[in-house]
Image: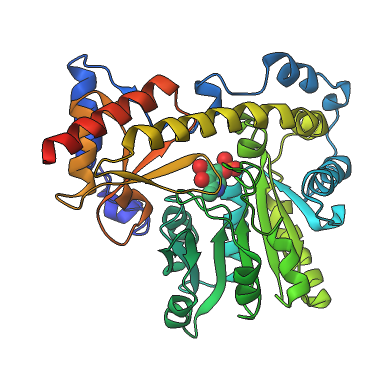
């Protein structure tokens, strides 16, 4: 047998050792001990997906029998996205500036290809979405964190951006609302980001899930183009916006203060997208129908998230654990006393039959954070709250 070092690339050699929580889950599974999952983020697994009839009917378009490849997706599907952006968020974008991809992960990959050479750097928020480091590794770029600071709400720490920026910085990522902290990018923050003169990549997949009355930020970072950002890429997709992760359609909206730069970026993206042609025709033909049906799906999800959040907040009131106030999204961050690591807390909860995520997975700068998925069945959130209350009592 050939030694794998001679066959497989160095860059694909990632550490696959399961962490302590994964090992504990495996052990519980082997021993037949069940647990309640308070980390759910797959709407189709918790009864919150789009109704089956609409999913299926929309796919039955006879035009699916023909293949007409378009690098950025079928014009009518791109028009449907542009019209939906205007209808729901009041954001105007030309359909020609919308490109369809299979997932936001693919969108990140294309943009890393467009905006960075091997070893170049992107600034990314911390804490944030755990998949970003993996996508960066696949695309050979380096991520450098900038800070989100927890004040009354979580805010971008602009000094930390100044400190993190180097001659190799090529773009800045913002997630609005951020996963898991739930803060929207606010107008003054968007101004500060636009003034950096860097391309902005803004992930808005959770933007239509406010968790309380009046919680809002900028309707879309595409508006940064009018505030001087040379290039802006706004990312969204069906997986969150319409609770259809299985349909694999996401999109990038492209804008920018510099028209020629925008045209050149679109031209280069077209060549890259033409090499992939990754979005399936039946899904593109169904897209308009799904976007129309998504308002109701989001209303149901919003209700689940808000009632889970309220239950969690009420249960932890007056204990040593507290819920950090999110503005939007599908997650809640619970702050716990910093005795022992986040992992220890998560293991203690699992021992008592509930799964939550330790904060370190999201790159919090210190221990003392647990992350819960607000899509979870209410019984799982109630159980997590009950166990947390028990554990907090045990501290006294
Ligand atoms: C911030 C953020 N962006 C994107 C995604 C996933 O989107 P997609 O399924 O389109 O890759 C997630 C999934 O949890 C997410 O948290």
Residue 266 position within the rendered picture, expressed as x and y whole percent measured from the top left: 77, 64
Q: How is the image coloured?
A: rainbow
Residue 170 position within the rendered picture, expressed as x and y whole percent measured from the top left: 56, 75
Residue 147 position within the rendered picture, expressed as x and y whole percent measured from the top left: 42, 68
| In front of the other: 358 or 253 | 358
Residue extending farthest front: 318
34 w.r.t. 255: above or below: above
Residue 5 visible in the current orientation: yes
| In front of the other: 389 or 192 | 389
Work out which quarter of the rendered image holds the N terminus and state it: top left
Work out which quarter of the rendered image holds the C terminus and state it: top left
Q: Quadrant of residue 191?
A: bottom right
Q: Quadrant of residue 317?
A: top left
Q: Quadrant of residue 224?
A: bottom right
11 w.r.t. 144: above or below: above
Left or right: 89, with 38 as reference point? right
Q: Residue at x 74, y 75 (%)?
A: 227
| In front of the other: 309 or 18 | 309
Ligand 1 sits in quadrant: top right
Residue 140 visible in the current orientation: no
Residue extending farthest bottom: 167
Left or right: 183, with 220 as reference point? left
17 w.r.t. 177: above or below: above
52 w.r.t. 25: above or below: above
User: How many circles with numbers are drawn on the protein?
Assistant: 0
Q: Residue at x 79, y 22 (%)?
A: 58
Residue 30 position within the rendered picture, expressed as x and y whole percent measured from the top left: 20, 18
């Amino acid at each position: 047998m050939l030694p794998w070092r001679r066959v497989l690339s160095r860059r694909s050699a990632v550490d696959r050792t399961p962490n302590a929580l994964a090992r504990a889950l495996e052990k519980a599974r082997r021993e037949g001990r069940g647990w309640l999952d308070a980390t759910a983020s797959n709407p189709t697994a918790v009864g919150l997906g789009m109704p089956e009839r609409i999913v299926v009917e929309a796919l039955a378009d006879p035009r699916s029998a023909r293949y007409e490849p378009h690098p950025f997706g079928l014009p009518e599907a791109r028009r449907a996205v542009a019209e939906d952006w205007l209808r729901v968020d009041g954001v105007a974008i030309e359909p020609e500036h919308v490109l369809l991809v299979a997932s936001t992960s693919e969108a990140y990959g294309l943009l890393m290809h467009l905006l960075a050479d091997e070893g170049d750097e992107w600034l990314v928020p911390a804490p944030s979405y755990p998949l970003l480091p993996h996508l960066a590794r696949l695309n050979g770029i380096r991520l450098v964190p900038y800070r989100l600071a927890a004040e009354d709400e979580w805010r971008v720490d602009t000094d930390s951006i100044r400190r993190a920026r180097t001659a190799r910085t090529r773009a800045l990522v913002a997630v609005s609302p951020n996963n898991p902290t739930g803060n929207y990018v606010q107008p003054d923050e968007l101004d500060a980001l636009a003034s950096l003169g860097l391309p902005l990549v803004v992930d808005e997949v959770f933007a239509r899930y406010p968790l309380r009355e009046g919680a809002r930020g900028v309707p879309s970072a595409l508006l940064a183009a009018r505030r001087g950002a040379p290039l802006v890429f706004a990312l969204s997709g069906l997986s969150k916006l319409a609770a259809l992760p299985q349909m694999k359609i996401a999109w990038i909206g492209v804008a920018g203060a510099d028209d020629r730069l925008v045209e050149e970026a679109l031209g280069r993206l077209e060549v890259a997208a033409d090499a992939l042609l990754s979005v399936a025709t039946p899904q593109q033909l169904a897209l308009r129908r799904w976007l129309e049906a998504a308002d109701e799906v989001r209303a149901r999800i919003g209700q689940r998230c808000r009632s889970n959040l309220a239950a969690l907040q009420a249960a932890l009131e007056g204990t040593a654990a507290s819920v950090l106030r999110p503005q939007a999204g599908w997650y809640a961050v619970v702050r716990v006393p910093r005795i022992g690591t986040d992992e220890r807390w998560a293991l203690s909860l699992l021992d008592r039959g509930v799964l939550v995520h330790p904060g370190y997975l999201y790159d919090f700068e210190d221990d003392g954070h647990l992350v819960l998925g607000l899509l979870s069945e209410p019984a799982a959130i109630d159980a997590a709250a009950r166990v947390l209350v028990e554990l907090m009592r045990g501290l006294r």
